[in-house]
Image (spheres, rainbow, N blue to C red):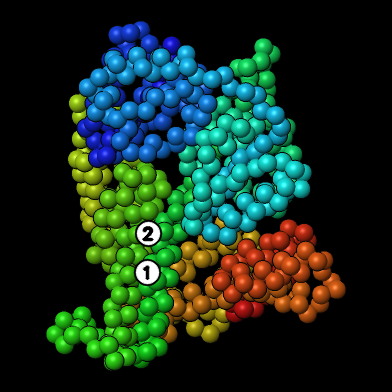
Amino acid sequence: MRIVAVTSCIAGIAHTYMAAEALEQAAKKKGYAIQVETQGAAGSDPMSDQTIAEADVVILAADLEVRGKERFAGKPTLEVGTSEALAKAAEVIDRAVATVQDAPAASPASGPRFVAVTSCIAGIAHTYMAAEALEQAAKKRGYPIHVETQGAAGSDEMTAADIAAADVVILAADLEVRGKDRFAGKPILQVGVAEALSKPDEVLDRALALRGTGTAAASARTAPAAAPAAPKKVGVGTRIRQNLMTGVSYMIPFVAAGGLLIALSFLFGGYRIVDFTAQQIIDNGFNVANLTDWAGVMFLIGSATFAFLVPVLSGFIAFGIADRPGIAPGFLGGAVAVTVGAGFLGGLASGFIAGYAALYISRIKLPAAFKSLMPVVIIPLIATFITGFLMFVVLGAPLRALSEGLSAWLSGLTGGNLIILGIILGLMMAFDMGGPVNKVAYAFATTGLASVPADGDPNSVQFKVMAIVMAAGMTPPLGLALATSLRKRLFTDAERQNGKAAYLLGASFISEGAIPFAAVDPLRVIPSAMVGSAVTGA
């Protein structure tokens, strides 16, 4: 008898690990093999797909919703609280074993069914456009498909029944897919989100070729099956870029909210609104009929929002590397970067330092008695000290000098130099329309805003760079949309419909609105879009 279990208490500390140890001891006494995954604050190495596939029964001893519960689809499952697993571990083991006899036999799948997950770096346009492309391609062939979009707006997660009925899993993602373990035993095809968007039919064909090659399917046959395609290895450079874009994607709402509020405050209160202070509201109260008071409050809120840019960037870079243990030292590192004047460059450095420090500390194997101390004492204490020490003592001064030098260089850009920068950024924004090069240009602009104080000069070069990037990013979809309106005879009905959508996408600063045109005729669309964006940037 093979058992797998997951323990998770509300605080994620003591009960989680004590219940795990109790179940392990009880199973050992009865001669059963067991592996327990602890979903606690300190994290745990998740059990492998092979372990789940070989398990006879699953025990979920949890007071919270278990993460990745769908990966146990089709397995006999016993759900109890952590307190019960801790106090009556032997009884829980017996009840779990008894459920195996009552579990219905799994019925074979009757036709090609797919589940898919899409996820791009920014979690915005590519994620949802790739999902729609896969759904449309599957619909044409009459194949059922459920696509889960792991994007900024979220999506309804696929159910355990969806996964159990699926023949193949398609992971169209540029980031690590959340809950990947729930697909244990299923053949998996991994592709980039851009490939799923531009070649959905080819992706479905490749997925069909994997049908029946998963662990679960292979165990049901006497003849061995070919193994599913191995997942692509992610290089160091790609991993760094993914972590950086994780931080940038979480920073975007702060940039948008703070920037718009400050812009509105200037609109209603003029540039002198920068002299407005919170003390004025406290001393004099808020006058609903006074437009200056409204503008002042918007300026104060926007300024407070902008103060979070560097800490959020740093904190979520660390989160992308080490998950939850990286957040606290990451935010601290970002705050230190602001304190020492290192700006967004300091935020980048502190995010990676905090993330990798927390990651390696969390991997240290400690006796069971100390596991509960990892999330609340050991990781925060050591990772935060390492990050703070390096930022204050080692990196603070050089990063501050570098940040000041970059700001001085940008401030000195005028005339021809600024035009050259605009051309370069314009070319980058249109090169892959929402891809890595596009995101690098966007990250350069948004992180540059972090070095500008809220009451800074509205004519500073950092704001001009942001304007260049936004205008250049809007040019491809708006230009192509306009072309479909002015020269309708040159486009198909489908392209004219895409043109209507591109108006809205372009106006919303979503460069991906041009992708349907670029996918059909890349040799003409991409160079022309790059020229247009370069002219716009200049």
Q: Is residue 533 above or below residue 96?
A: below
First in sequence: mark 1 or mark 2?
Answer: 2
Task: Name the residue rendered at 34%, 54% in the picture.
Answer: 315
Determine contact: label 1, label 2, CB under 8 Å: yes
Q: How many marks?
A: 2
Amino acid type, label 2: Leu
- Answer left or right for 462 relative to 438: left
Query: How far apart, in angstroms, are the residues tagged by discs 1 and 2?
Result: 10 Å
Q: Secondary structure at mark 1?
A: loop
Quarter the C terminus occupies: bottom right
- Answer left or right for 474 relative to 482: left
Q: Do we see residue 487 in this rendering?
A: yes
Q: Between 107 and 209, which is closer to the camera in this rendering?
A: 107
Q: Position of residue 441 (x, y in %)?
A: 53, 65
Quarter the N terminus occupies: top left
Q: Which mark is residue 427?
A: none
Q: Which mark is residue 313?
A: 2
Q: Residue furthest right?
A: 489
Task: Name the residue rendered at 37%, 69% in the picture.
Answer: 450
Q: Which residue is mark 1?
A: 450
Task: Name the residue rendered at 47%, 66% in the picture.
Answer: 444
Q: Do we see residue 237 in this rendering?
A: no
Q: Quadrant of residue 94?
A: top left
Amino acid type, label 1: Ala
Q: Residues within 10 Å of mark 2 (few under 14, many from 20)?
A: many
Q: Between 64 and 149, which is closer to the camera in this rendering?
A: 64
Q: Position of residue 201 (x, y in %)?
A: 74, 46
- Answer left or right for 445 relative to 453: right
Q: Residue furthest left?
A: 283
Q: Between 319 and 405, which is closer to the camera in this rendering?
A: 319
Q: Residues within 10 Å of mark 1 (few under 14, many from 20)?
A: many
